[in-house]
Image (tube, helix red, strand yellow):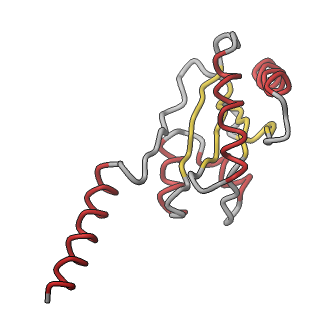
């Protein structure tokens, strides 16, 4: 009986952490109204490529890129495709993300989404340098 109670408490704790956002945290925000480009990071805590790409994206984001770019993180850590695509919809990039990824969520990529056309116009991968990322963001924002 003691074991079942302990297991129940562990599951209850995990559920409470999940609901409170301590386990599955999403930094998803709505693309800014003035943004012409959404830089959408498809991220998961367990993804090795994400761990390489994320700091580069943050460094590029800190560069003076000007107005018109909104940064969005879609968290796939929980491997819940429904929640992932719901978050993409809430951020206003669901149509473009679905068109690009299809039924398979591939993490470790920064999708450059034209907010008006609702389509992916470029990708940033972990192999790119911060300077290349800044150039890709600037170029895509100018074209959007």
Nearest the viewer among 70 and 2 is 2
Nearest the viewer among 40 and 97 is 40
Residue drawn at x 70%, y 57% is: 106
Residue 41 occupies quadrant: top right
Q: How many marks?
A: 0
Image position of 16 with respect to 116: above or below? below
Which image quarter is the C terminus in?
A: top right
Residue drawn at x 68%, y 23% is: 59
39 with respect to 123 (left or right): left
Measuring from the top left, give residue 53's x and y in whole percent.
72, 39
Image position of 12 with respect to 123: above or below? below
Which image quarter is the N terminus in?
A: bottom left
Image position of 92 with respect to 2: above or below? above
Nearest the viewer among 4 and 28 is 4
* Residue found at the far bottom of this picture: 1
* Residue found at the far left of this picture: 1
Image position of 13 with respect to 9: above or below? above
Residue drawn at x 60%, y 41% is: 93
Residue drawn at x 69%, y 10% is: 64
């Amino acid at each position: 009986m003691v074991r079942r109670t302990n297991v129940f408490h562990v599951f209850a704790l995990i559920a409470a952490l999940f609901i409170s956002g301590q386990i599955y945290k999403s930094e998803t925000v709505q693309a800014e109204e003035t943004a012409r480009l959404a830089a959408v990071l498809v991220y998961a805590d367990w993804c090795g490529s994400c761990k390489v790409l994320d700091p580069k994206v943050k460094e590029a984001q800190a560069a003076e890129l000007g107005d018109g770019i909104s940064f969005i993180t879609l968290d796939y850590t929980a491997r819940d495709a429904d929640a992932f695509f719901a978050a993409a919809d809430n951020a206003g990039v669901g149509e473009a993300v679905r068109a690009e990824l299809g039924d398979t969520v591939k993490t470790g990529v920064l999708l450059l989404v034209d907010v008006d056309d609702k389509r992916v116009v470029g990708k940033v991968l972990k192999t790119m340098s911060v300077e290349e990322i800044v150039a890709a963001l600037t170029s895509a924002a100018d074209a959007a």
